[in-house]
Amino acid sequence: MQNVKPLSRPGLWDLFITWLGLGIQSFGGGSATFYLVRQTSLARGWLDDDEFTRAWALAQVSPGINLMKLTILIGKRLRGWPGLIVSVSGLILPSALVTVLMTAGFSAIRGQPLIQAAMRGIFPATIGLSLAMAVQMGWPLLARARKEGRARLAAHVLVLAGSALMLAGGYGSPVVVLLLSGAATLLTLAVVPAGRELPVEKEAG
Amino acid sequence: MNLLLFFWLFLKASLLSFGGLGNLPFLHKDLIDLGWAQESDFVTAIAVGQLSPGPTGLWSLSLGYLTAGWLGAGLALVALSLPTLLILVVASFYNRLEKLPSVQGFTRGLSLGVVGLTLAVAWGLAGAAIEDWYGILIAAGALGLALSKRVPVVVILGLGALAGLLVYG
């Protein structure tokens, strides 16, 4: 994608204002923002559909916040390093400021009984959200393994459960557990060949 | 508090994670072990991260603020931003990386490990966040609503707050 010329070349100020707008509108979580960024990129002719999908795929395989990586790729592509800097600043700075101000505001009022009661309801809800995230991330991985046969599905479940139990039990740091999971999966994929395709029921998104 | 170590811990967590709450297990272990943060700081930061605009990954700015004030939030933001530049390296090696089967296999294992870590951390946080059967009900309700994908996160947390007011208020 490095060789392809961008479809349009916006001015730096214009670029900053556009990303600032995206950053300010990004209430409602990452996936809502992702669609907003996609819509804007395509509408302004920054990237075409294929290029956008490829950029998003690349953002999944390197460390850090996915949306920030996507912004880096688009900003750099449009206007080089200055483009990268104004795009990321526009996206992140307003939300970063609001996040810290909300934390500060909350620290100031967290002693009040009604706030405490509300927080005692919000905390369990965040646990539910974390579990939902685990299910949403784990489901496609297990569904893919299931298509490759029972043996691979079993191996995947073992790696998943093993890593969860190791960390919950305090055996090994997260880095060690992650590297072990990677190595174990690489090994089982090499040893256990993909079996015949099993009938797969309708998959939930 | 050693600010250099503080910065390194946030940087390391960001380098080893893929966005969202991915850096949570690392920060949770390191900051709790050092005694710099409480379980309640983590649940607070996660809740604020979900409610505030921008990527969920910004939750660690909230944690930075709770542990070390405005300076902590600033250091957390720099630590969160720097590793994302590695995408440029990955993009330039993209064609070679993508075709190696061993890279694909290892990446699948990493993803499985990330799911395992998420579960383990939820288990650890549940000790501080869930007090009784009402807490379990609220967590289960939030899980169901989130999985339905029809209810925005802000509404789920708002319902949690409402339930808290009714039960504990």
Image (cartoon, coloured by chain):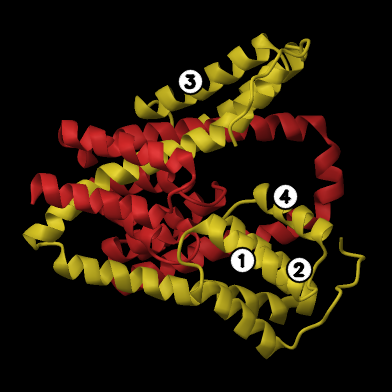
> The residue marked by circle 1 belongs to what chain?
A
* Amino acid type assigned to the residue bearing label 3 in the image: Gly
Q: Earlier in the sequence, mark 2 or mark 4?
A: 2
Image chain in yellow: A
> The residue marked by circle 4 belongs to what chain?
A
Secondary structure state at the residue bearing disc 1: helix
Single out the mark in the foreground, 1 or 3: 1
Q: Do marks 2 and 4 both belong to one polypeptide chain?
A: yes
* Residue plotted at (38% across, 73% down): A98
Please give the residue where the numbered disc 1 appears in the rendered image. A36
Marks 3 and 2, how far apart in space? 42 Å
Q: Nearer the viewer, residue B130 or A173?
A: B130
Single out the mark in the foreground, 2 or 4: 2
Image chain in red: B
Marks 1 and 3, how far apart in space? 38 Å
Left or right side of A85 for A26: left
Please give the residue where the numbered disc 3 appears in the rendered image. A162
* Residue plotted at (33% across, 46% down): A126
Please give the residue where the numbered disc 2 appears in the rendered image. A42
Marks 4 and 1, how far apart in space? 17 Å
Residues at badges 1 and 3 in contact (C-beta under 8 Å)? no
* Amino acid type assigned to the residue bearing label 1 in the image: Leu
Q: Earlier in the sequence, mark 3 or mark 2?
A: 2
* Amino acid type assigned to the residue bearing label 4 in the image: Ala
